[in-house]
Structures are given as structure tokens and as C-alpha cells.
Amino acid sequence: MSIHFEKVDHIYSPNSVFEFQALEDVSLDINIGKITAIIGATGSGKTTLVQHLNGLLLPSKGFLTVNDFTIKADEKPKNIKELRKQVGLVFQFAEYQLFEETLIKDVAFGPKNFGVEEKEAEMIATRALITVGIDPKDFVKSPLELSGGQKRRVAIAGILAMSPSILVLDEPTAGLDPQGAKSMMELFKMLNKEKGITILIVTHNMEHVLEYCDEVVVLEKGKVIMHTDKKQFFKNDQYMEKASIDPPIIIAFKKMCEEKGVTFDSDVLTIDKLVSEIVKKRGRR
Amino acid sequence: MNNITLGKYIPLNSFVHKLDPRTKIIAMMILLIAIFIPTGFVGYGIIGVFLLISLISSKLSFSFVWKSFKPSLFMLVFLLVINVFLIKTGDVWLTIGSFNLYSGAVIQTVYIVLRLLLMIIITTMLTATTKPLDLTMGLEDLLSPLAKLNVPTHDIAMMISLALRFIPTLLEEAQRILKAQASRGVDMESGSFKEKIQAILSLIVPLFVSSFQKADDLADAMEARGYVVGAKRVRYKQLKFTFFDFITLVSTSGLLVGLILLRVL
Ligand SMILES: Nc1ncnc2c1ncn2[C@@H]1O[C@H](COP(=O)(O)OP(=O)(O)OP(=O)(O)O)[C@@H](O)[C@H]1O
Ligand SMILES: [Mg+2]
């Protein structure tokens, strides 16, 4: 089990006026069993990068390996269906992919494509819908009757129903209310902890990175400029500035304190810890 | 999907790009008429040379035109097969068993292929060198005499420009949905008939839903910015007729007249 990118380039519409190099010389090892955040400014190539993982896009140069699959330039990997079963990819604004008459049918669509019997598929779908927190009495509703956030959950259930071992989420919380976004992140954390699913999340939300992710990959203009664990990442905020991202409030707070001469340990990354540090410092005075 | 070139605007800097859209629309119509004047291969040769020169001066690549032509290949093969079986004029060129291939069938097919190829080059040149908005502006101007007869020319032009504006958006959307469904194991290429139907539904339904949503949003956005159906509007950009437009129109008209003379004499 591994995810490895080796010198991957991706060029959109090569040899035309629309030619655009979206990825350049990307070499990357994603750690299995972890939650990895992929961050970077708009247009830095995050979506392009993750769409390689299940063979939707092929490298223009270089190759990548995902579990036992090799995805090379200009050649569809063998048994691509199995790859797509193992790597579940949830799209940016996934709610637009729903099409069946009822939620349960829509979620069962994935497993059925992978050869699961109708009855069995619906059972899997039921479980997936419960996992993402949809009310069972809504299961026979049409997707069109749901709110945007609920639709997003159903779309995620549609991917979970394929029981992937790697789950890739492209901005899963964009446009959700803060509470809904939080509970969705909790869901991913739970899937990672309890089922051991490797998770990659494309996100612009640094609070989520700080609270839920283990590792961080920073993209800039199609290049990976940093890949490190969370603690290291939040130690130097120059990368956040480079990726034009606001730091989480707690990091910003610490920085302001440091400018005034009060320093905290770099391990202090939660409110709880920060408060007890402050109390400790006061006690010492 | 990325290879769909039909109706795509290619931003280049060429003589043809700079022509007035009205000129290009009129020239296109003249050329389309010219194609249907039966002057045999000589006429097609003349039009072909004319188009070749225009194509080169528009800086579009040949492969681009070829890509626009490719989707119709299937239809042409189909046509060839039908012609081969139905047309029984001219000399027999080939006999296989009880089947005779007549020269008429082949010549007829070549005519149709040439005609279609020329038509595609002409229309592609128009849409590839003219921004959709300029195109509708030109169209509106050309239709403006009809406004006197109470034809809502402006609304028609607006509808056309919206439709053109949304072609790339729809293609992008379709591509996105295709990818999303492929991630759920949809295989557009292989699979049984039933699976294929299901696969197509999984594309069409979301596409319809989001198109209606977009249309709704767009209508609201236009109204919010004060758009009133049928109201009188002025233009920010003015079309300008230059010396080059004059030359273009004269030379295309000359071509048409020449072909007519060739036919009559
Ligand atoms: N189909 C395409 N054809 C040509 N260029 C494309 C295509 N898709 C994306 N690009 C370009 O590639 C670059 C990277 O796009 P990508 O979607 O990967 O960015 P992103 O990091 O996901 O951005 P965002 O945060 O806005 O989602 C962008 O500059 C975009 O314009
Ligand atoms: Mg993206």
C-alpha cells in the first residue's frame, strides 16, 4: 500500500493555443493511514493533482503508483475500474452528480457499477447514508428535495459505499455552514481512525488543517513546494503567506504575542493547551 | 471532450480576426451559396483555393479544421455505403459477384464530401475567428431592418449570444460530471446496452438539472442588473467597417459572380 508520484507533469490541451502546464515535476510520497491536506492558491493545481490518483487524468510525463497500480503517461492503467473502487474521489461541488430518483438508489449506483447485487448494494447504501448522517426517513426522497449541504453528504455517501481504502476529497466543505463543515471534518477523522482509510483533503481552511490533518502538501504554480507534518508546517508561516492563505486564529494569536515578546512552545496548537500555557506563565510572574 | 472544436473561438491575432463580424457573416453566406452552384470539380477547386488563402491568413491550423471535420466522418461513411448500393449511373468500375460499383456512386459521394468539407471550413472560420459577442452584435445589426416589422431582433440576438456563451460552460460541466461518474465506476465505452443507458442517464440528468439552475440564476442576475425584455438599449462597442472589410466583400462577391458566369457560359 502506497501512493507515490514520480516526476509527474500534467499539461492541459498540449500543442494548442490553450496549452497550460498545470503540474510540473511533482514527486511526492503520501503516507498511508494518515490525513493529508493539500493546500495552495486558486489555480495552483490541487484538483489536477488529485484527479491523477484514480486515473481520471494521466500524467503528461512521469508516473505514479497507487497501491498495486501504475499510472503512466498516455496509457490507461489496466483494470482501471478496480483502481477507481480503491480510490474514492469526491469532487468539488459533488452535489451536482446526483441523478437517481431516490437517495438510496443514487448511493447504490456506485457499488452496482462494481458488480454488487441490487439488494446488497442497497444495504451498503443504507449504511453509507447513516454514516454521513442522513435521516433514514429521507432515504426515499429525491436528491432534488435536499439542501446543498445534504446533497454533498449524499454524494460523499455515494463514494463511501464503494468502500475505498483511499478517500480523496476536493474541497468537501466549500460553501457549507461552519457547523456542517465541522461535522463533515469529524466524519472524515472518524473514517480515518476507525476504518484506517487514508484520506487526502484539498482545502482552503487552515483551521481544519490544524485541527484534523496530520500532514500538509503545499502546491504553488503546479509545483510541490513543501510536504511536511502539521507541526513543522505551522512553525514557519512563510509558506502560508506564499500560498496566500490566512493562518489559523491560534497561530495568528501566537504570532502577535511573539511580536510583543511573549513566546509559546511550537507544540501549542490547541486552545486548551494555549490557555494552560497562559495560566502557567501568569503563575510564574 | 476536450477535442470538441465546434463553435470554439480561438484567440489569435490575424487579418481575419480583425474583420468586422458583419463582413464575416455576409462573406460566409456568399460562400455557402457559392458551394451550391453546380460547377463541378473546377468550381470546388476555385473555392478550395480561396478558402486555403483565407485559412492561412486567419492563422488557424489545419489540424484544428480537421478536428472539426472528424465528427462528421461517420456520417460520410454511412452516406458512401448508401450511395454505393443505390446509385446506378455511369460506368461500372468494379464487379464483385453480382454487385456492381458505378462511377456515379463514387463521384456523387466525393461531391458530398467536398461540399461538407468546404462548409465546415467556412463555418469554422467564422466561429473560430469571431468572439461570440461580436458575432451576435453583427447578427443583430444585419437583422435590424426586420425590427421595423416588429421582429424582436435584439431579443433574438441576446438569445443567440447567451446560447453561444453557454456552449463552453456546458461542455465543461459535462466533462466534470463525466469524470465524477467515472469515479463511481461508470464506463462509457464498454458494458451492456442497459449499462450504457444508465451511464448516459447519469450524465444527462445532472446536466439538465444544473442547466436549468444556471438559466434561473442568469435570469435573476440579468433582472437584478436592470435588464428588461424588449427595452431599448445602446451599445458600448461600435462596429467599424474598414477598407479590409471592403476588400473581403468584393473578393467573395467576385468569386460568387465568377462561379455563376462559369456555370452559365
Ligand atoms: N481542462 C482544462 N484545460 C486547460 N486548463 C485547465 C483545465 N483544468 C484546469 N486548468 C488550469 O490548470 C490550473 C490548475 O487547475 P486546478 O483546477 O488544478 O486548480 P486548483 O488548485 O484546484 O484551483 P481551485 O482552488 O480554484 O480549485 C488552472 O490554472 C486552470 O486554469
Ligand atoms: Mg480545485
Image (tube, grey):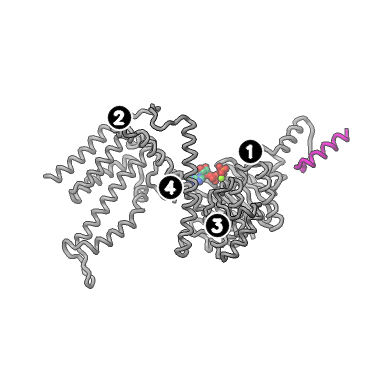
**Is B124 situated left or right of B167 in this image?**
left
Helix, strand or loop at mark 2:
loop
Query: Upstream in the sequence, badge 2 or badge 3?
Result: 3
Q: Position of residue A19 (x, y in %)?
A: 46, 45
| Residue wearing tag 3 | B184
**Is A95 situated left or right of B12 in this image?**
right
Q: Confirm or deny contact between disc 4 and disc 2 (CB under 8 A).
A: no
| Residue wearing tag 1 | A245
Helix, strand or loop at mark 3:
loop
Q: Which label lies toward us, 4 or 3? A: 3
Q: Confirm or deny contact between disc 1 and disc 3 (CB under 8 A).
A: no
Q: Which label lies toward us, 2 or 3? A: 3
Q: Badge 2: how crowded within 10 Å, few (<14), some, or many (20+)?
A: few
The image shows residue A247, relative to residue B181, as above or below, that is above
Which numbered tag is attached to residue B212? none
- On whether ligand 1 comes within 8 Å of the CB at mark 4, the answer is no
Residue A271 counted in the magenta span: yes
Which numbered tag is attached to residue B241? 2
Task: Report how far apart the C-alphas of labels 1 and 2 lie in the structure.
Answer: 49 Å
| Residue farthest along the left direction in this orientation | B265
What type is the residue that disc 1 sits on? Ile
The image shows residue B64, relative to residue A104, as above or below, that is above
Q: Quadrant of the C terminus of chain B?
A: top left
Q: Which label lies toward us, 4 or 1? A: 1
Magenta part of the chain = A266-285
